[in-house]
Image: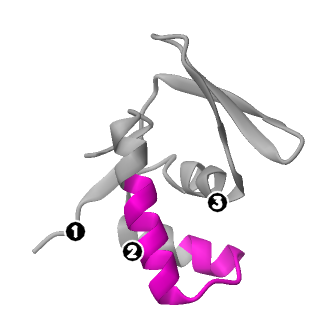
Amino acid sequence: MTETLWQRTDQWVGTEVEDSFVMINLETGTYLTLNATANAVWDVLETPQTQEAVEAALLDRFDVVPEDCTTAVTSLLAKMRDMKLASPV
């Protein structure tokens, strides 16, 4: 069985502002702010990655328990999919 690959969509652009990453959807004009964790996931998803690879990148960057990381990444990828920030490829 092959794991799903995730990649960010190209409808969003953004920039760092203080401790956040502010983004705007070029098609809808919707804007949002990513916290440090979501911004790290956004960076990792520049190229297609499995959820496992995303988790590994976060475990390298943040002091987090692996089980908590899995739960958080699962939830965050679902939110990113719903907001059309990222999608399975």
Q: Is residue 28 above or below residue 52?
A: above
C-alpha separation, residue under disc 2 versus residue under disc 1: 9 Å
**Label 2 neighbour load within 10 Å: few <14, some 14-19, many 20+:** some
Which type of secondary structure does the marked residue at label 1 adopt? loop
Q: Position of residue 9 (x, y in %)?
A: 42, 33
Horizontal arrangement in the rendering, residue 51 relative to residue 26 (left or right): left
Q: Position of residue 62 (x, y in %)?
A: 70, 76
**Comparing marks 1 and 3, which lies closer to the viewer?**
3
Callout 2, which amino acid? Answer: Glu
Which type of secondary structure does the marked residue at label 3 adopt? helix
Which type of secondary structure does the marked residue at label 2 adopt? helix
State the residue lying farthest toward the right: 18
User: The magenta stretch spans which residues?
Assistant: 57-77
Which residue appears at 63% of the width and 57% of the height? 40
Q: Between disc 2 and disc 1, whose residue precedes?
A: 1
C-alpha separation, residue under disc 2 versus residue under disc 3: 15 Å
Magenta stretch containing residue 64, yes or no? Answer: yes
Q: Are marks 2 and 3 in contact (CB under 8 Å)?
A: no
Horizontal arrangement in the rendering, residue 89 relative to residue 31 (left or right): left
Q: Which residue is mark 1?
A: 3
Q: Which residue is mark 2?
A: 52
Would you identify the image quadrant in which residue 44 lies? bottom right
Q: Position of residue 35 (x, y in %)?
A: 69, 50
Which residue appears at 60% of the width and 53% of the height? 38
Q: Which residue is mark 3?
A: 37
